[in-house]
Image (tube, coloured by chain):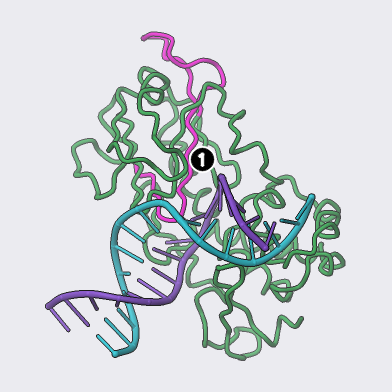
Chain colours: A green, B cyan, C purple
Amino acid sequence: MPEVETVVRTLRPQLAGAVIAAVWSSGKPLRLNRPLQLAALQRLCVGARVAGVRRRAKYILMDLTPDTDTAQVASAGAGVLFHLGMSGRLRLQPGESPRAAHTHVVLRLGDGRELRFVDPRRFGCVRPARQVDALPELAALGPDPLHDLDADTLRAALASSRAPIKAFLLDQRRVAGLGNIYVCEALFQARVHPATPSCRVRGRAQVLLAAIKDTLITAIGNRGTTLRDYVDAAGAAGDNAAALLVYGREGGPCRACATPIRRVVQSARSTFLCPQCQRR
DNA sequence: AAAACACCCTGCCTGC
DNA sequence: TGCAGGCAGGGTGTTT
């Protein structure tokens, strides 16, 4: 989510007010919307003006308004929903610059720039909607930990689940926006073992929420974590990898107690933890 | 109902 | 150098 937030922040001032002149697609389907509805995307976007760029959990919402100079193609509430998946990137580049491999959707702007959706693994999505806020992808999302989650709400949710806390925090219906890296980091900071049943973390809801917020705010301040490929819309990598306390540090010394960091697999995802600081 | 699992896809790294 | 296998930051649909 810090990566998505960084993309939104870099995109917003660059894109606000821009008019979309044309839409291109590679023709390849994306995992989260197959087939990609190119015709619908063109109908909605061409001649529309970008009214704003927002984040909801790990989704990016681009709001559109009709451009008064052209046909009324975008109704009120219309927009495009983006998800970057594991390998997706949104880049704003000059139209004459070469397109990266795996460029799947391009929105050409009236001034010649292009918003390019690049996604080697095609796990992402680019979805047009007349009412973007009403899309089913957004309907079941839980509260955003930075904006509308308080300790009491989290405590009540924790009490109702026996799932491992790691799985609980990754479940976007419970808390929306946390990915694998930041769950590992937040659990370490809160000194909670990732396999602890959620109901047994109930008494530490306040500490856990504070750790989640701190982890996210730090990562956003560092403009996201670049492990390999991630860059923001301007092509800049994030600096947060150096700030990670456990993620990707298997065998390395715990920053708090020097015990070697361990990697375990939980529900088919890597989990990193300090066995000393995070006791069951 | 909730939790575990397979799957979607490509690229990169490791070890043989 | 080549190839097989494992791994990856995420979400969905099916099975248990």
| Pointer 1 residue | A60
Q: Quadrant of the C terminus of chain A?
A: bottom right
Q: Is residue A263 above or below residue A122?
A: below
What percent of the width, then of the height, locates residue A13?
45, 36
Mark 1 residue element: strand
Position of A24 relative to A247 (above/below): above
Q: Is residue C9 left or right of residue A216?
A: left
> Which residue is pictured at 49% across the width and 43% down the height?
A8
| Viewer-closest of A85 and B9 | B9
Q: Amino acid at mark 1?
A: Ile
Query: Residue A62 lies in magenta, yes or no?
Result: no
Q: Residue at x 83, y 51 (%)?
A: A153
Disc 1 crowd, CA 10 A, few/some/many (<14, 14-19, 20+)? many
Residue visible at 81% across and 54% down in the picture: A157
Which chain does tag 1 point to? A
For residue C10, above or below residue A35? below
Q: Position of residue A63 (x, y in %)?
A: 51, 27
Task: Identify the image quadrant of residue A188.
Answer: bottom right
Quadrant housing residue A56: top right
**Residue name at image x 58 percent, y 89 percent:** A260
Left or right of A98 in this view: A252: right
Closer to the camera in the image, B15 or A94: B15
Segment colored magenta: A63-92
Residue A155 % position (x, y): 84, 58
